[in-house]
């Protein structure tokens, strides 16, 4: 099942705010509906956001084909709906290059979708090979946030590697870090692993480094929202703490992300706009600071697996 697709003239998504309680499909007919879905995280995860951005331009082209000013505003709204994952603006810009033709925009958006599907398969195979090389035949993994098919179109990035290891009979265990405050790990990763029949345990985020120190994890495997030119990795807040824990315990810290997440135009993590999602998601009792992402410096990263290559940013550190 695809997390996001173009079906009968509209975008269809799995509503990720309803999982794991309900598998609900939403149809999005307007740019306004899409922007709301992106901002509420009904559709989320870097590769899926890239596809959403591209299909969003198709929605705009359908309505405003004869109005360049309206088209420009719509493309800006889609691109800027969330600031951190590079895929969103990149997907929208790529489709926008085919404006004003609706057919050409839709064809480009479908190509973005198809490339993400192919990228997931390529990353799964390459990542599984690397994990076995780094950890031996049956690694026990810890993952953070949700990086499965829900975050891509099918299969996913880091969780696609987990799936591939399981398929090969090479997975000894997986811990899903719960991912405060919106629980992408406890709700979404756990749901996907259950769908795939993969046994797993959920841990509170702060338990991750301790589980590593206690020898219960062989490697950390995560996705990314943006990979900077110097190899800094932007991912869901909490990733940096896991990377520090992995370094202290002497464990590999592996990032899995498609080339569409690699951003040579952003020099370092300091240059990335980190979305702050406000107090209400964290606590009703006090003012909160709520960065949705953090920066893992390149020297803590053992390897970045893309659909085309393995990058070893810490080798140059
Ligand atoms: O705020 P979210 O849920 O969109 O954040 C998603 C993540 O941080 C994922 O780890 C990242 O997009 C990689 S998903 C393949």
Image (cartoon, helix red, strand yellow):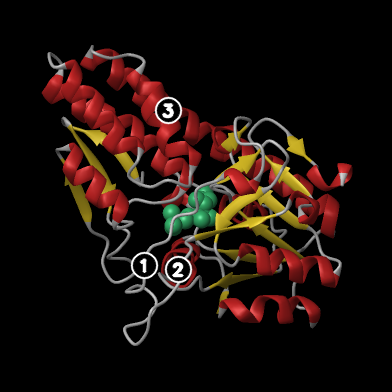
**Would the CB of label 3 be found within 8 Å of ligand 1?**
no
Residue under label 1: 278
SS of the residue under disc 2:
loop
Q: Is there CB contact under 8 Å for labels 2 and 1?
A: yes
Check disc 3: other Cα within 10 Å, few if <14, some if 14-19, many if 20+: many
Q: Is there CB contact under 8 Å for labels 2 and 3?
A: no
The answer to whether residue 218 of the structure is visible from this angle is: no
Q: Residue at x 36, y 73 (%)?
A: 279
Residue furthest bottom as drawn:
285
Residue under label 3: 112
On screen, residue 163 versus residue 309, left or right, reads left
On screen, residue 100 versus residue 283, left or right, reads left
Q: Residue at x 42, y 76 (%)?
A: 288
Alpha carbon of mark 2 to alpha carbon of mark 3: how far?
Answer: 31 Å
Seen from the viewer's position, the closer of residues 224 and 229 is 229
Q: Residue at x 16, y 24 (%)?
A: 70
User: Residue 264: x percent and y percent?
Assistant: 63, 30
Label 2 or label 3, whichever comes before in sequence order: 3
Judged by depth in the image, the label closer to the viewer, 2 or 3, is: 2
Q: Residue at x 67, y 58 (%)?
A: 221
Label 2 or label 1, whichever comes before in sequence order: 1
Label 3 or label 1, whichever comes before in sequence order: 3
Alpha carbon of mark 2 to alpha carbon of mark 1: how far?
Answer: 6 Å
SS of the residue under disc 3:
helix
The answer to whether residue 66 of the structure is visible from this angle is: yes
User: Residue 261: x percent and y percent?
Assistant: 56, 38
Residue under label 2: 290
Check disc 2: other Cα within 10 Å, few if <14, some if 14-19, many if 20+: some
Kindly indicate the quadrant of the structure image that contains residue 263.
Answer: top right
């Amino acid at each position: 099942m695809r997390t996001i697709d173009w079906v009968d003239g509209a975008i269809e998504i799995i509503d990720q705010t309803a999982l794991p309680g309900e598998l609900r499909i939403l149809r999005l007919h307007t740019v306004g509906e899409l922007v709301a879905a992106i901002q509420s995280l009904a559709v989320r995860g870097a590769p899926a956001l890239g596809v959403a951005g591209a299909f969003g331009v198709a929605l705009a082209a359908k309505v405003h084909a004869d109005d360049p000013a309206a088209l420009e505003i719509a493309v800006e709204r889609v691109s800027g709906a969330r600031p951190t994952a590079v895929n969103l603006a990149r997907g929208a810009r790529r489709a926008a290059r085919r404006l004003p033709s609706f057919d050409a925009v839709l064809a480009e958006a479908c190509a973005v979708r198809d490339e993400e599907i192919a990228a997931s398969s390529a990353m799964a195979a390459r990542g599984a090979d690397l994990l076995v090389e780094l950890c031996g035949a049956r690694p026990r993994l810890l993952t953070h946030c949700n990086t499965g098919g829900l975050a891509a179109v099918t299969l996913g990035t880091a969780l696609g590697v987990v799936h591939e290891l399981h398929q090969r009979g090479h997975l000894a265990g997986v811990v899903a870090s719960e991912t405060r405050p919106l629980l992408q790990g406890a709700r979404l990763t756990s749901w996907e692993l259950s769908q795939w029949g993969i046994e797993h345990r959920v841990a509170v985020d702060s338990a991750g480094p301790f589980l590593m120190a206690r020898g219960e994890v062989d490697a950390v495997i995560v996705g990314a929202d943006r990979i900077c030119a110097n190899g800094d990795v932007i991912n869901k807040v909490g990733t940096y703490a896991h990377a520090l824990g992995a370094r202290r315990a002497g464990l590999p810290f592996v990032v899995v992300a498609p080339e569409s997440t690699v951003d040579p135009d952003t020099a370092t993590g300091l240059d990335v706009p980190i979305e702050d999602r406000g107090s209400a998601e964290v606590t009703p009792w006090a003012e909160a600071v709520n960065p949705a992402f953090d920066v893992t410096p390149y020297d803590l990263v053992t390897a970045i697996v893309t659909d085309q290559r393995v990058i070893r940013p810490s080798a140059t550190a």
